Each structure stands twice: as structure tokens, then as C-alpha cells.
Image (spheres, rainbow, N blue to C red):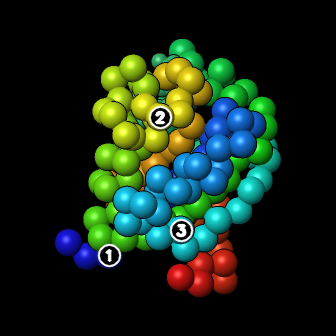
Amino acid sequence: MAIQQTFSIIKPDATSRNLTGAINKVIEERGLRIVAQRRILMTRAQAERFYSIHSDRPFFGVLVDFMTSAPVVVQILEGENAVDVYRTVMGATNPEEAAEGTIRKLFAESIGKNSVHGSDSEENAALEIGQFFSESEIVG
Ligand code: ADP
Ligand code: MG
């Protein structure tokens, strides 16, 4: 498996509980490298575009409200097989189903307020990275 990049968001429930460093510690301990990182307050337009695949789901409005409710930290993570590795490090969407030691098991509050996002494919990782980072911000 080659070195890959994946896109990560530390979500508002985590930034508002001052958990950015604690989550980054887990990310780094599992061998992923944070090669770009920025704290932003997402606009509604950004959040709606980012989660447009879920626009028909009943929780879409609540999700957009949540993602714009407080700052998030957008990140690019790099490592061997990074897309799948980070999904494993994050744990299941619903923290009640997340494995021990995963970020969502450790920190998530609910299926909605679940502390982190991670890309679900290499193709989506490239699209998501492109939505939030320019080439000049990615220095390795
Ligand atoms: P994941 O983030 O694990 O890839 P999904 O892509 O299915 O999960 O959903 C995107 C995000 O939408 C979730 O991380 C969560 O914040 C929110 N979400 C998903 N399902 C629900 C739900 N049933 N109720 C409320 N929010 C949800
Ligand atoms: Mg998803």
C-alpha cells in the first residue's frame, strides 16, 4: 500500500470541549502525520456543499446547523493506507458501536456530535482536500 492522504475534520463538539490536542495525540500515536491543519468557522454554504451527499437525509439540517455552530479544525493526514487507517482510528459513526480506543469511543457525544470526520475513499479524500486546502498550504 502506498502513502496516501486523507481529509479530517475535528468537529464543533470536540473543539468546544478543548479536545483538539487530545484528538491530534491519538491521530499521531496511530502513525498518521498531520501535514496541513487550519481552524475555521464553516459557512452554511461550505457545510451544505461538504455534506451534499446527505442532502436528502432527515438529519441534514441538524448536521449543517451543528457543523456551523462553532469552529472546526480541517486537516490533511498522511500515511500508509491513510484513508482506511483513519476510518479505523475514528471508529463507527455511532459512538455506542465504536470499538475501544477509537476517537469516537473516547470522545464522541452522540451519532451526530461524533467529534471527527474522515474521508471514506481516496477519491473523496482528494475532493474534500481540494475544498479546503490550496497546493501552497500543503508542505508535508
Ligand atoms: P461518517 O461520518 O462515519 O462517514 P456518515 O457519512 O454516514 O458517517 O454521516 C455523516 C455525518 O452525519 C456523521 O458523522 C454524523 O455527524 C451525521 N449523522 C449521520 N447519521 C446521523 C443520524 N442518524 N442522526 C444525526 N446525525 C447523523
Ligand atoms: Mg461519511
**Residue under circle 1?**
3
**Residue under circle 2?**
106
> Does the residue at mark 2 contact the one at mark 1 (Cβ under 8 Å)?
no
Q: Quadrant of residue 96?
A: top left
Find numbered disc 2 in the image and state the secondary structure of the residue it sits on: helix
> Does the residue at mark 2 contact the one at mark 3 (Cβ under 8 Å)?
no
Give, as a three-letter code, the residue at label 3: Ile
Q: Earlier in the sequence, mark 2 or mark 1?
A: 1
Q: How many C-alpha atoms fall within 10 Å of the one at disc 3: few (<14), some, or many (≥20)?
A: some
Question: Can you give x and y, in whole percent of width and height, for residue 70 in the image?
Answer: 78, 38
Describe residue 50's horizontal placement relative to residue 119 as left or right: right
Question: Can you give x and y, in whole percent of width and height, for residue 45 in the image?
Answer: 74, 42
- The residue under the point 46% across, 57% down is 27
Q: Quadrant of residue 52?
A: top right
Give, as a three-letter code, the residue at label 1: Ile
- The residue under the point 74% across, 56% down is 39
Question: In front here: 69 or 61?
Answer: 69
The disc label shown at residue 34, or none: 3
- Res. 72 visible in picture: yes
Q: Among all residues in the image, which is located at the extreme top?
A: 58
Give, as a three-letter code, the residue at label 2: Leu
